[in-house]
Amino acid sequence: MIRLAAVGQGNDSVQVVVRRSGPPRLQTYHVPRIQPMKVLDLLLAIQRDEDPTLAFRFSCRVAMCGTCTVRLDGRAVLACETPVPGGGGPVHIEPLAGLPVLRDLVVDTAPFFAQWAAITPYFVPRDASAGPARIRPGSPERELIDPRLDCITCGACFSSCGIAAAGRDFLGPAALNRALALVADSRDGATSQRLARVSAADGTDRCHYIYGCSADCPKGLDPAGAIRGLRRRPFRPFRRRWRALPGRRRLRFRPGLLRRPGKKSNMPNGGQ
Ligand code: SF4
């Protein structure tokens, strides 16, 4: 472990402004810069050398456990993998938005995991007695599922979502991303319940496609894209019935036909 030298305020130090609790305040520290230096190194240096009362969470230090998520200059990041910005200006570190603060940078993640639990986030086999079934690598099904699987439930997307973090009833990006991974699986035995759940008032229709979740996901997932995918899925049975109609070649099904009149989509691709 690197023991940092006495605190200095020259060019080789980082000015850090941390949002503290009890009482709520902004506290400024000056920490000697090391190379390379992650945000977690900064927090550990403060706690070790300046202020042992500073509270924050971390565990694996390799961006796998999702416990060290904080806001760095307003954006949700994993402290263990995010380099300390250069440039000489102060660095602002705050707890995640939209979750109750327990102490300093430690938040209560119960609201986030309540949403996660609401979509039955585990695989329910359609036929428990059937043998192992495989989804072929490279199949369209596998290509839809794979990009949704790396979620580490870090809560960054929750904090970066203006709807979820504002405390409005919304299942949130992580839960909806997980829901798509499960309903896209042909072996899933709970698809209709899951689709009914995500189609409720607090489901996919609450998303305004700000894309903050996809921009800030540290694992590079696209929860906003998953929400778009879920919005399309309930129309599939309708689409199949449409294809079965006589004369369908002359008329083409367009999902936009199902939208309420006068309601424009704000999705980048027009909601297709
Ligand atoms: Fe974190 Fe990304 Fe999962 Fe959201 S979708 S909880 S940002 S890993």
Image (cartoon, rainbow, N blue to C red):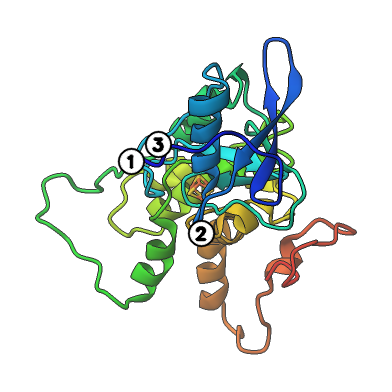
Residue at image x 68%, y 37%? 16
Q: Residue furthest right?
A: 262
Kind of residue at badge 1? Tyr
Residue at mark 1: 122
Residue found at the far bottom of this picture: 250
Local crowd at mark 2 within 10 Å, few (<14), some, or many (≥20)?
Answer: many
Tell me the quadrant of the picture where the N terminus can be found.
Answer: top left
Where disc 3 sits, the SS reads loop
Please give left or right for residue 24 compared with residue 229 in the image.
Answer: right
Residue linked to disc 2: 221
Whether residue 199 is visible to the viewer of this picture, yes or no, is no
Q: Residue at x 61, y 38 (%)?
A: 31
Ligand 1 within 8 angstroms of badge 2 C-beta:
yes
Q: CA distance from mark 1 to mark 2?
A: 19 Å
Q: Pointer 3: what residue?
A: 120
On the image, the x and y values in percent for residue 146 come to 37, 64
Q: Residue 216 placed where, x, y %?
A: 61, 53
Give residue 59's position: percent from left, percent from top. Answer: 37, 35
